[in-house]
Amino acid sequence: MAIINPAATASFAAKAQKSRGRVHAEHESATRTAFQRDRDRIIHCNAFRRLKYKTQVFVYHEGDYFRTRLTHSLEVAQIARSVARVLGLDEDLAEALALAHDLGHTPFGHAGEHALDACMADYGGFDHNAQALRIVTKLEERYAAFDGLNLTWETLEGLVKHNGPVVTAARSTDELPRAIAEYAETQDLELDTFASAEAQVAALADDIAYNNHDIDDGLRAGLFTIDDVLAVPLAGDVFREAIDENPMIEEGRIISEAVRALIGRMVNDLIDETKRRIAAAGVASSEEVRALDHPVAAFSAEMRENDAALKAFLFDRMYRHYRVNRMSSKARRIVENLFEILHKEPELLPPEWQAGCDGSNGFKTARRVCDFIAGMTDRFAIMEHRRLFDLNSEQ
C-alpha cells in the first residue's frame, strides 16, 4: 500500500510555508511546519488539559464512559484530519483547529455557558469562541516573550471564523463578542470573509462527531432506546441495517456498529459535496476560498435535512431529558453563585487572579472572574462552590 503524503497537495489548501506568520516573530522550527507547531502548542497548553474534566452533556461524575470535551476534541481531530487528507488540504491545520475549537468552553457544557453569559450581560457577555481566542492570545502564560500561544494567522482566523464570517450585513464589528472586537484592533483576521477550507472542514467534523457520540452516550445512558432512533431519518436506516446484519449480537455492539457506519456516511457525504463545490467554484488558492460568498465545505442538501432531523431528535430526547435538565439546573446555580460572590468579593479569588481587578462589582473584576470561572473544570467548580458556600468544607 502506498503511503499518502500528509502535506497539503491541493492548490486551494492553506500552505504552511506561505503562512501570514505570527504576531510575535519567532525562528521557524527545523523539524515542524508552522501549523504542526500550532497543533503541538495547543496540545501542551493548560486549557487543553482541562478539557478532560469538562462536560459535553453529562457532568464528569456521571460515569467514566461518557464523552468529555477532551475525548470529543480528539474525535473531531480524527475526522477533520481524515477528510483533509482525502481533499488534499493541510491536515495539521485542520487538526490544530479541531483540537482548539472547544478551549473556550465553560464547565458544565452549554448550561454553564448560558449561565456565565447571563452573569456577564452588563460586561460584554460571554461567547465560547471569543473565549478560545482570548485563551490562545492572552490567558495562557507559557512563554517568556509573550502572552498566549502566538499561533499563526491561519489558526487564529480558523478559530474565530470556522462557522463563517463573523462580520456580515446583519452584524457589524460593534456587535462582535468583546474579545474578538478587541483582538481585531491588534491583528486583522478579515472577519467579513470565510476561513480556509481546513477551518470549514474542522467545523463540520465537529458536527459529525457530536451528533454521533451523543447518540452513543444517550443510548448507553438510557435516555432513549434504539427503537426511538429507528424513527429518525438516515440514523434509523443505519441502525436497522446494523440490526439486520448482526441479529445475534448484544446491543452495545449494535450501537457501535451503527454509530461507526453513520459517521462514515456523513464523512463521505461531506467529501463528495465539498469536491463538487470546489470544482464548481474553480478555486485555485486558499485566498480564492476566502473570497467566495459561500462555504466550499458542506453537506449535501439531503444530508443537511438528515442532520437537522437528528439534531431535533437529540434536542427533544436528550438535551431536554429531565435528568439532563436537573444537571443543567444545578450547573447554572453553581456558576451563578460563584460569579455573584467572587464579583462582589474579589478578595476571595486566588492572589494571582486578584491582579487586574478593580474592586467590588467592577468591570475589570467581572472580566477576571469570568476568565477564572470559564477555565474551571466541572469538578473544580463543584469543589470551589463547596469551599465558598459549605461552612463544613475545608478551605
Image (cartoon, helix red, strand yellow):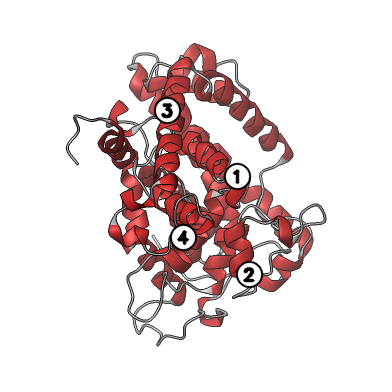
Query: How far apart, in angstroms, are the residues tagged by discs 1 and 2?
Result: 21 Å
**C-alpha gap between disc 1 and disc 4:** 18 Å
In front: label 4 or label 2: 4
The amino acid beneath tag 2 is Ala
Residue that label 2 marks: 184
* Upstream in sequence: badge 1 or badge 3: 1
Task: Identify the image quadrant of the N terminus.
Answer: bottom left
* Image mark for residue 244: none
Residue 21: x and y in percent read 53, 80
Residue position for label 1: 121
Q: Which residue is at the front of the view, 173 or 42?
A: 173
Nearest to N terminus: mark 1 or mark 4: 1
Q: In this orientation, which residue lies closer to the viewer: 234 or 55?
A: 55
Between disc 4 and disc 3, the foreground one is: 4
Q: Can you tell which mark lies on residue 216? A: 3
Label 4 and label 3: CA atoms lie apart by 46 Å
Sequence-wise, the earlier of marks 3 and 2 is 2
How much space separates mark 3 and mark 2, taking CA atoms? 39 Å
250 shown above or below 341: above
Q: What quarter of the picture does the C terminus occupy?
A: top left
Please tell me how crowded label 3 is: few (under 14), some (14-19), or many (20+) other residues with Cα within 10 Å.
Answer: some
Instruction: Please state which of the two labelled residues, at mark 1 or mark 4, is closer to the viewer.
Output: 4
Name the quadrant containing residue 153: bottom right
In the image, what residue type sits under mark 1? Ala
Q: Position of residue 296 (x, y in %)?
A: 69, 56
